[in-house]
Amino acid sequence: MKPNVIIYLLFSLFVGLMSWESQNAQAESQFHQDIQEEEAIRLRILANSDSISDQALKRSIRDEVNEQIRVWVDGISDLEEAKEVIASEVPEIEKIVEEQLAKKGIDQSFSVDFSDVEFPTKLYGNMVYPAGVYDAVLITLGEGNGENWWCVLFPPLCFLDMENSEAQEQVEESDEAEEEVETSFFVVEMVESVWDRLFG
């Protein structure tokens, strides 16, 4: 095969791949709705470590705190009002943590703050919560060195996230595998198409 034919073939393949990536990015941006940092209140729990007991404690505190906050903000549609309610209930959240520690017989320090907290990007359905600093309840257990949990307290999406977290991980793994297969087929089809045009 002549060198100029190979160069043309590689260039055509590159242009096709770039076009596909661009169209894919445009489709995703049209489907997803970005939520601004000032439009949500979030929850972040830092576990003491990745040990089984520390992670179990994190999950039990997550469930209790989320359930209680859902009760507190039930019927509230105004974000500022929700902030005031949650901030005023920090002592009650501290009690929940104390109760869970006592229930599991764990002697561990902790802190509960309602402040500006940094979060990574998170997707809930078609809503994208970009990485940034959000108003949030931050619960730090012990050294806070373990795998942490984060979700959206207001509007309340924590329950949705807890219900779907495991399934979502499996779906994402499946989607990644499908994307790899689809991309591979796409490349093969493009090469065959260019080849046919050149030599067919």
Image (spheres, helix red, strand yellow):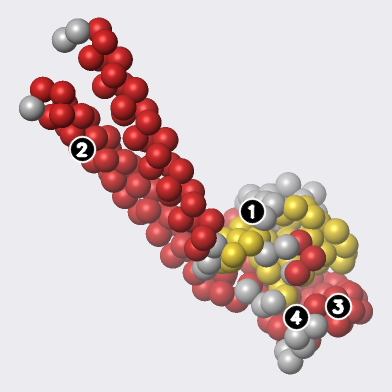
Q: Amino acid at mark 2?
A: Glu
Viewer-proximal residue, 13 or 119? 13
- Rendered residue at 31%/28% (across/down): 13
Foreground pick, 48 / 101: 48
Q: Determine crowd level at label 2: few under 14, some 14-19, many 20+ residues with C-alpha closer than 10 A.
A: few
Residue type at mark 1: give it: Thr
Q: Residues within 10 Å of mark 3 (few under 14, many from 20)?
A: some
CB of mark 4 within 8 Å of CB of mark 1?
Answer: no
- Vertical placement of 2 versus 139: above or below? above
Q: Name the residue tied to disc 3.
A: 80
Q: Earlier in the sequence, mark 4 or mark 2?
A: 4
Q: Which mark lies nearer to you, 3 or 2?
A: 2
Give the residue at mark 1: 121
Q: x, y (%) of residue 95?
A: 84, 76
Q: Amino acid at mark 4?
A: Ile
Dot placed on the residue nearer the N-terminal end, 1 or 2: 1
Instruction: Answer left or right for 127 relative to 11.
Output: right
State the CA–CA distance, disc 1 to disc 2.
34 Å
Q: Which residue is mark 4?
A: 69
Give the answer, above or below, for where 125 lies relative to 86.
Answer: above
x, y (%) of residue 106?
75, 63
Above or below, 86 against 19 in this view is below
Residue at the image position 50 percent from the left and 63 percent from the top: 31
